[in-house]
Image (spheres, coloured by chain):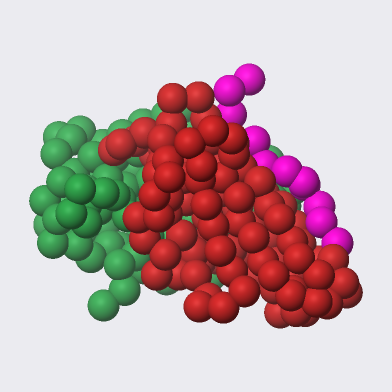
Amino acid sequence: NAGVMQNPRHLVRRRGQEARLRCSPMKGHSHVYWYRQLPEEGLKFMVYLQKENIIDESGMPKERFSAEFPKEGPSILRIQQVVRGDSAAYFCASSQQGGPLHFGNGTRLTVT
Amino acid sequence: AQKITQTQPGMFVQEKEAVTLDCTYDTSDPSYGLFWYKQPSSGEMIFLIYQGSYDQQNATEGRYSLNFQKARKSANLVISASQLGDSAMYFCAMREKTGNFNKFYFGSGTKLNVKP
């Protein structure tokens, strides 16, 4: 199956630790988007990347959050020094130019 | 102005009946796309249906159809013959072009409850 793969599915971190979320886009897709979803809420855009380029990071908090999509390997969303407010579901989606977004199953981050 | 507006936080429908979920959008891009996604309680986001701004006919996919009214800037989702498994959150989304790239906007969602 060539769907969007996210891992881990669940991630528990203590306050102050780092969280690394991985996303492999669908085969043939070169555009990756990251979204955050709090319980009972909609999707909040975070960042849009193409291979080796950040296209739009207007939704990313200025501190502690970073994202990359290297030439080889998955896209990584990195959260440093996590706080309780970072607890959420993080979704990755990929698309071809002009096509719909296809989502992964998400990573549920819990900060204790 | 909001790019995507879903005015119904929650909806109830009787099993086997049809239901319409509302969505309005705002864009100045002539070449945009409209999408609907379903998010069941298990959490995954499932792509349901797509409508391009230049498409003359309303999109249909099985029991899903998109009632596209371009002049009103509305893209309502119609689910016919509702099933219990249709109970979920439904998100309307729009793609518009920004320079050479596409940006996607999502509505706040409608929670659909199908009653037996």
Q: Is residue A74 above or below residue A26?
A: below
Q: In x, y percent, where is residue A37?
A: 61, 64
Q: In x, y percent, where is residue A32?
A: 46, 45
Q: In x, y percent, where is residue A97?
A: 30, 36
Residue B62 located left or right of residue B29: right
Q: In x, y percent, where is residue B28?
A: 13, 61
- Point out the stretch of residues depicted in magenta: A1-12
Residue that appears at 18% across and 35% down = B55
Question: Which colour is chain A painted?
Answer: red
The reply to whether residue B1 is in sight is yes
Q: Is residue A79 above or below residue A106?
A: below
Residue that appears at 39% across and 49% down = A53
Q: Nearer the viewer, residue B105 or B92?
A: B105
Residue A99 located left or right of residue A46: left
Let me know if residue B88 is in the magenta part. Answer: no
The reply to whether residue A105 is in sight is no
| Quadrant (top left, top right, bottom left, bottom right) of the N terminus of chain A | top right
Q: Outermost residue, top direction?
A: A1
Question: Which colour is chain B painted?
Answer: green
Residue A42 located left or right of residue B58: right
Let me know if residue A3 is in the magenta part. Answer: yes
Residue that appears at 74% across and 61% down = A19
| Quadrant (top left, top right, bottom left, bottom right) of the C terminus of chain A | bottom right
Residue B77 located left or right of residue B10: left
Q: Is residue A10 above or below residue A86?
A: above
